[in-house]
Image (cartoon, grey):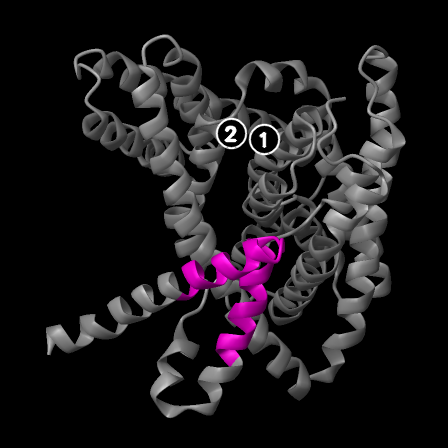
Amino acid sequence: MQEGSLILPVTCIIGFLFIAAISTMVLRRIHFPYTIGLVIVGIGVGITAAQFDFLKPIQNMQLTPNIILYVLLPTIVFDTAVNMDSRLLFKTLSPVMILAAPGLIISTLLIGTLASIFTPLTISSALLFGALISATDPIAVVALFKELGTSKRLTMLVDGESLFNDATAIVAFQIIQSIVAAGSFGAFVVFSGTLKFITVFSGGIAVGIVIGWLIIFILRFSKNDPLIEIALSTVAAYAAFIIANFYLNVSGVMSVVGAGMAINWFGTNQFSERMKKYLYEFWAYAAFVANSFIFLLLGLTENNMIIDIQKHQEYILPIIIAIIIVLIARAAVIYGLVPFVNMRHSSKLIDIKQQTIIFWGGLRGAVPLALALSLPKGFEHRKMIIEITLGVVLFTLLVQGTTMSHLIRKLKLKDSHK
């Protein structure tokens, strides 16, 4: 009996990995971003599974908040952090943090206000939607920009923003959710919320840096054994998340970022070239697997949404309105805040072409969906928040994602060294 219960999930996992590998081979040959392509493949798998009884179990495989936030996200984030050019990140830290923190707060308030006016959502539900949908998802953005070959600085701006504001969105979402649950809102609540935000965000980074440093210290005794070093880097990624998130009540995602960057920074002189290659290849593979499952499952989930919308057509107009509102908020943040960044750093301007790429590159992926699905069953307008979140995610991936490479070529930013 136990054997039979294990066969199905194992078969599905192997099948998904096979589909991802074959699809990626084809997508790379036709120069189509594989993460976006896997969403389309996932939708196709869902349609096919509905036609054949022996494939029906595939339809039961769905993205859940726990799978995204606790299993797959740490792998994606750690891969980005441990392989990121730390020195280039520090050079672009000012614009990255302005977009990731004040930018996300402005976007949350703007989306929340407009959504409460133009959709059936109440102000509290609309603000929650604003928080979860405002962050550009690193799972989507990082994978896409690796495919497109833009300049290092532009890639860092987009990657850095998405990496940090992912954690910012999760923290903001949790704080707004606790305020809504408390049922009170005032100056003290705003102050305590701001203080909690700073504590959770910076505390997460600090915890991650300490764990990363400890792992580097232990690695001094490994004598450059790649198996031990890769094993301990995996421990660092997940220990950082678990300790920060569950035991210290700070940001698990920021802790993973801090651990990855600490290993990157402190390990520069300690790791041999052979070790660096092993580390890079292992985490590239781990991120590929995590990305593949996320985007295939996202496609399956989107397919179910399309079927659901056919039954409940009252969601169509709110989804269209939500897409427009999210684009307006993204434009307001990018074109409104970047000029202030340029005033402070006049020697390294982010020109209008780069601003346009950052604006249109504001893809949303699995993290907004995970936050929407994490809402309690009895939460007001939960179903509508999930549906409009899915609609926005689908639009950003299939419209913005598929046109990104054309826009980069049009603006002559591909392979630029500016």
The stretch in magenta equals 19-46
Foreground pick, 356 / 236: 356
Q: Is residue 257 left or right of residue 386?
A: left
Which disc is residue 197 wearing?
1
Give the quadrant of residue 3.
bottom left
Secondary structure at badge 1 equals helix
Q: Main secondary structure of the magenta part?
A: helix
Q: Which mark identifies residue 200?
A: 2
Residue drawn at 53 percent across, 82 percent down: 47
Q: Quadrant of the C terminus?
A: top right
Disc 2 residue type (three-letter): Val
Describe residue 134's horizontal placement relative to residue 71 as left or right: right
In the rendered view, would you say 286 is above or below 195? below
Q: Are marks 1 and 2 in contact (CB under 8 Å)?
A: yes
Residue at screen point 70% across, 18% down: 94
Q: Is residue 247 in view?
A: yes
